Amino acid sequence: MGAAEWTGALLDWRLALEGLKERFGSVFSRSELRVTAGAFVEGLLSSVERKTGWMLAEQSGAMKPYRMQSLLGRSTWCADQLRDLAVDYVREALADDGGVLIIDETGFLKKGKHSVGVARQYSGTAGRIENSQIGVFGAYASRFGHGLVDRQLYLPKAWCEDGLRCAKAGVPDGQAFATKPAIAREMVSRLLDKGLPCAWVLADAVYGADSQFRTLLEGRQQPYVLAVRSNHTLRFLDAERQLFQTDPSIMAAELPSDAWATLTAGEGAKGPRLYYWARLSLSFEGPAGFERWVLVRKSLKDPNAMAYYFAFCKKGTSLAELAGAAGARWAIEECFLRAKDDLGLDHCEARSWHGWHRHMTLVMIAAAFLVKLSADQRRCAFPKHP
């Protein structure tokens, strides 16, 4: 799919693309690199089916893939600097007081054992344990659209304990093992420090179960809705200072029938996504003016199909607002789908640490371009009511 098709309009987008190339050109010290990076991003935006070195080289008119492969490998430039430019670009396109920051991971299926971070591990992409790489990503979503704003490869502990293997894959010296929630904590801090206006931080149960992640957000007075498992352990002191233990599923089972409300979790392909919602207050000693909840979602058709969340929000936040925030997490799945199907997020051939991050960041830049193009169209079409 080409850029004009993606945005849903036949428009002259090349001027905007040249502006983007000029903007990210500062990352590349040599003119040859700037030209190659521009051709790489154009290739990602093209209708070429596989975004590999050979195919992107042919798309640019080159006879061999050397320059494209060198861009991801031997050349000298900083992928984190380009990532920061992508964040700025997405912020300009989508920034909104009601925007949300979403953290999630996605898998990249691989053959062999030499690609950095590859291991037999659970991949949500495959829905099972597979030989794969796992990347932790951040996305920003608002009424204007949604786009990826950060990425980091998850490096399994077995890799971190094998110095020779890490050296061959170009893993930076001192790169210690970090859990996915630890990566998320660093990522969220960095993105919030960049000034993204953020009404909510959203994530699935891998991150919702991490108390340090929740503590970090609460310390910043940052509202969140984080999924948790039904059996996540909760401990309380009763009126007699006796410790008792429960979990979200037990708490939800004790809710009276009038505690539930039918609310939307946002728009789906077939209209509003309606569920039963309820919430239970949690004891809280934290910033004044805030409160904690256990949020529960139940299917209209199957009362046994339930989902659970921890929520931290300003006092007076309604149940409908919490339900809407919980439903906004789907936006990062749409980002992954678009980036993989249209831009080659999962077509990375590089085996090294810096090669992986360079490929993902260049795809983020291409995706940010499309996001800004679409957001600008929305603003032009609906100048008063985007």
Image: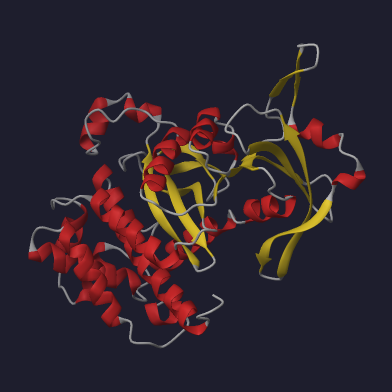
Q: Position of residue 91 (x, y in %)?
A: 39, 61
- Give the tally of numbered discs: 0
User: Going 63% across and 53% down the picture, which residue do you hit?
Assistant: 325
Q: Is residue 211 left or right of residue 251?
A: left
Q: Residue furthest right?
A: 257
Residue 112 occupies quadrant = top left
Q: Position of residue 125 (x, y in %)?
A: 52, 51
Q: Position of residue 383 (x, y in %)?
A: 50, 80
| Quarter of the picture holding the C terminus | bottom right
Q: Is residue 278 left or right of residue 33?
A: right
Residue 65 occupies quadrant = bottom left
| Quarter of the picture holding the N terminus | bottom left
Front-lying residue, 26 or 289: 289
Front-lying residue, 172 or 182: 182
Q: Position of residue 27 (x, y in %)?
A: 18, 57
User: Going 72% across and 35% down the picture, which residue do you hit?
Assistant: 230
- Colour scheme of the picture: secondary structure
Q: Is residue 249 left or right of residue 173?
A: right
Is residue 248 in view from this perspective?
A: yes
Front-lying residue, 290 or 212: 290
Front-lying residue, 14 or 48: 14
Q: Is residue 20 left or right of residue 267?
A: left
Is residue 134 in view from this perspective?
A: no
User: Going 52% across and 42% down the picture, which residue do you hit?
Assistant: 222
Q: Is residue 64 above or below residue 71?
A: below
User: Going 78% across and 55% down the picture, which residue do you hit?
Assistant: 275
Q: Is residue 248 above or below residue 88?
A: above
